Amino acid sequence: MQTSIRVIICDECPTIRYGLQHILSSDPTIKMVLSTASTEEILNHKLDLKIDVILLDLKEINPTELQSLRRLKEKWPNIKIIIFTDCKNKSMIIPAIEVGIQGFQLKKAEASDIIDSIHTVYHGGKSMAPCVTNALLEHTLEQTTRSHNCLSKREQEVLNLISLGKTNIDIADKLFISTRTVKFHVSSIFAKLHVKNRTEAASRFRSLGDSNTSNENISGSLVMEVN
């Protein structure tokens, strides 16, 4: 029966590795199985390593680093990876998450925060430093704004009414168009916003703060289907 969380430290700086080893040694439930300078050394290690978590210093995300992360995930499908960041290079956050990174921790984090991050990802959670959470929120808002700007004026009108809980019949009456045309606009809105239903579309609309463009009260529950 496993009693320890098996951790690899991966940082090109020996001093940083030593410091992390000291931090990990303070928790009896964590066992460091390898301290190394690169992901390649991990992948090329001759021993049959049993790994739970990797603490990885990654200064940038390039095709080579992305491939290394994918290879780590392929070799150890259940492995959890925490990347150390200073949050100066925010462009690396989204690509890293897309390949399955579970955590981001600040390089200047307290020892207790590092220990907590290891336990969090090991038990299936996500551990994100506040600056990373903010970067993800900014990315989501940028994506939503970009998608919203792709909507035609009529589609924006339809989306506004969707956010107010209006049915297709309500929208058709309000805009003096047929329900068939409303259905066409709704389908187009879903495609452009990458959403599956009216609830998600309304949520995207409200996230931009555009729901205050109308003083109408929400009447009834949102209709989930295009029909």
Image (spheres, rainbow, N blue to C red):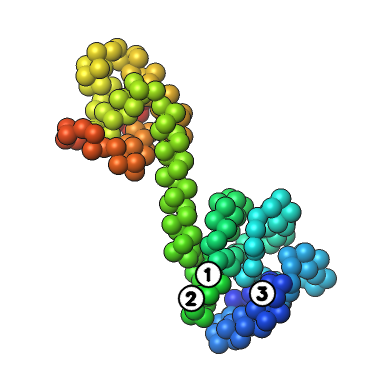
Q: Which residue is mark 2?
A: 113
Find residue 152 and report its image quarter: top left
Q: Earlier in the sequence, mark 1 or mark 3?
A: 3
Q: Nearer the viewer, residue 184 or 209?
A: 209
How far apart, in angstroms, are the residues tagged by discs 1 and 2?
A: 9 Å
Which type of secondary structure does the marked residue at label 2 adopt? helix
Within 10 Å of disc 1 (Cα), the crowding (few <14, some 14-19, many 20+) is some
Q: Nearer the viewer, residue 226 or 216?
A: 216
Question: In the rendered structure, are the residues bearing label 3 and label 2 in contact, judged by CB atoms less than 8 Å apart?
Answer: no
Indicate which label's residue lies in the foreground, 1 or 3.
1
* Mark linked to residue 106: 1
Is any atom of residue 222 visible in this view?
no
Question: In the rendered structure, are the residues bearing label 1 and label 3 in contact, judged by CB atoms less than 8 Å apart?
Answer: no
Within 10 Å of disc 3 (Cα), the crowding (few <14, some 14-19, many 20+) is many
* Mark linked to residue 138: none
Q: Residue furthest right?
A: 46
Question: In the rendered structure, are the residues bearing label 1 and label 2 in contact, judged by CB atoms less than 8 Å apart?
Answer: yes
* Quadrant housing the C terminus: top left
Q: Residue at x 46, y 41 (%)?
A: 143
Q: Which residue is mark 3?
A: 9
